Image: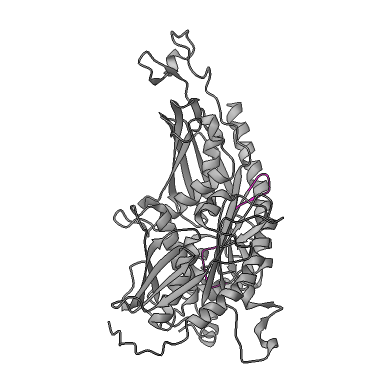
Amino acid sequence: MEIDRADGRNPNQLRPLSCSRGVLNRAHGSASWAQGSTQVLAAVYGPKAGTKKNENPEKASVEVIWKPKTGQIGKQEKEYEMVLKRTLQSICILTIHPNTTTSVIVQVVHDDGALLPCAINASCAALVDAGIPLKHLAVAICCCLADSGLVMLDPTKLEEEKMKAFVYLVLPNSILSVLPEESSSVKGEQMEQGLITSVTHGVMSVDDYLHCLERGRAATSKMSDFLRRNLQPQLSSDSSKAG
Amino acid sequence: MGTPNAVGDWSSEMEVSAFRRLFPLHYYERHLSESIRPDARPLKRARDTIVSLGAVASSDGSALAKIGSTTMLAAIKMEVMTPSVDLPDEGSIAVEFHMPPICSPVVRPGRPAEVAPVISKQLFDSLLSSGMIDLKELSLIKGKAAWMAYLDIYCLDADGALFDAALLSAVAAFSHLRIPVVSLNDEGRMVMVSKELEGEKLDKEPVDKERRKLSLKSIPFSLTCILHKNYILADPTFEEESIMETFITVVLNSSGQLVSLYKPGGPVLAHTSAIQECVALTRQRMKELEEIIDEAISTMEID
C-alpha cells in the first residue's frame, strides 16, 4: 500500500534536518531548528533569580513564551506553551538551582507541518547551548495516519490537513553507553521506550496509535544521532555570555 | 529535610494530618503500597459521578456534572448567524471554559488560570473530531442562515480531573439541548418564535415545527490517570495531581475509537503497557458514564 507523497519521500523518511546553535547574541542560549520548510527559533534566558507566585520555590521552574509568526496569541499558542513547558520540565534537572526561573522563548519562523515537534527540538538544542543541566535530551516527531492505516512520518502542512489524524510524540533520546548492553535495560523495558509527551489530533483506532508509537520510536534513533553530532562542542571561540 | 531516615523517625511521632502536609509524597506512597488511596478508593476506581440536566433554565441546553467534588456547569445558547462561504450547509460551535475565582484559591481575578484556555481548546477539538455532532444538523437555510451554539462551561469547584468533568458536562448539555423554533419574517431575517405563540397558528411557517434535539452519535468520554512509578491512579484529586505530576488523559468515543491521548510531559515516562492499561480503564469508565447519562436523560423525559 504505497502512497505517493507530494515531495516524493517514502513513508518512513524525514525531511532534511538542520540545526544551528548560538544564533542570537544576547540570549544565554539559542538555536534555530528546521525540518524541511518548518523553521523555529528558540532562545533561552536563565537561570534567573526568583520564581512566579504559584510555582514551587524548592525547584527550578521553566517559563515558556510562544510567539506565532502572524496573528494574536490565542488558545492554540497557550496550549503549545503548556505542552512545551511540561515537556522541558521533565527533561531539566530541577533540583540543581532551586528558586530560579529559566525562560524559553520560541519564535515561529515558518510553519509547514510538525510545528510543535520542531519547537521542542529547537528548545532542547537551545537549552544545551545555554548550559542548563538536563537529564537527557528530548526528540520530537510527528506521525500522521492516512485513511488506509498507513503511518507517515514528518508530514508537511498539506499532508497534516488532508490526513484523518496525526500524533506528536516526544521520546527521550537513545542511550549511547560506554557500559555493556545489559545495564541499559530497566525491568525488561529499556528507557528509550518510554514516552515523554503525546498530543493527538483527529480520531484513530487504539491499534493505529500504538503503531504510530512504534514507528516514532524507530525514527528517534536517526534523530538522536543527528542531534548528538550537531551538539558536539563548537571549536570556534564562543564569547562569554554573562547575563 | 525529606530524607528517608528522617521521615521514618518522624512518622511514628507526629499526627497524621501534619505528616500529610509535611511529607505528602511519603504519605501517598505508604497508601499506594497497600493499593489504596487516602479517600479509601482502590487505585483504579473513579469518584462518584452525578449528572443533572437542565440546571440553567434560561439557556437552550444545560447540565451540571460532578465528579467527586469537581463541579462543572455547562450551558448552551443558540444564535442564528450566516454560515461561512466554503461551508454553506454547516453550523458551528464555540466552546469557552471559564475558571472563575470561586473554583480554587489559586485563581484570582487578575491572575487567570493557565489551564483554562488549554482545556477550552482540548474540549473543542474533542467535541468536533469525535463526530458527536453533525454540523449539517445545525443548518437552517443553506447559504443564508445556520445555528451557532455557544457552549460555556463554568468550573465551580476545581478538585482534579477538570477535563473529564468538563467533557461530561458538555456532552450532557448537548443531550439536553432543544433547538428553538424560528421563522423567517418579512425582512428576510430569522426571528425567534416566542413560547406563547408556539401553540397557535402563525402567519409565517416556522422553519422547524417543534423544538428538536440533536442526534448525537459517537459520544466522547474521557479519563485522566496519574502515573507514579509503577502505579496508575484513575481520576485524581487536586492534591494527587499536585504531588504526582505525570498524568495522561485518554478520550474514547462510543464507537471505541481514540479521540485523543494527551500526555503533556511529566517526570514519569509512559511505556506501552501503561498506555494500554490507561486505555482499558477508560473503556470501563466509558460504560459507567454512558449509564449515568442515559439515566439522567430518562429522568428528564419522565418529568
Q: In the figure, is residue A51 to the left or right of B265?
A: left
In the image, is residue B123 above or below residue B54?
below
Q: Quadrant of residue B31?
A: bottom right
In the image, is residue A135 above or below residue A84?
below
- Is-magenta flag for residue B260? yes
The image position of residue B281, as x and y in percent, is: 67, 57
Q: Quadrant of the N terminus of chain B?
A: bottom left
Q: In the figure, is residue A171 to the left or right of A65?
A: right
**Range of magenta residues:** B253-268
The image position of residue A123, as x and y in percent, is: 43, 72
The image position of residue B284, as x and y in percent, is: 68, 52
Residue at horizontal 60 percent and vertical 79 percent from the top: A174
The image position of residue B9, as x and y in percent, is: 53, 85
Q: Quadrant of the C terminus of chain B?
A: top right
In the image, is residue B193 above or below residue B69?
above
- Is-magenta flag for residue A17? no
Q: Is the image coloured rainbow, by chain, by secondary structure, or in one colour?
A: one colour
Q: In the figure, is residue B60 to the left or right of B218?
A: left
**Res. A89 in view:** no
Q: Nearer the viewer, residue A184 or B47?
A: A184
Secondary structure predominantly adopted by residues drawn in magenta: loop
Residue at horizontal 54 percent and vertical 48 percent from the top: B126
Q: Nearer the viewer, residue B51 or B140?
A: B140
**Res. A147 in view:** yes
In the image, is residue B8 above or below residue B283?
below
Q: Quadrant of residue B144?
A: top left
The residue furthest bottom is A179
Q: In the figure, is residue B89 to the left or right of A52?
A: right
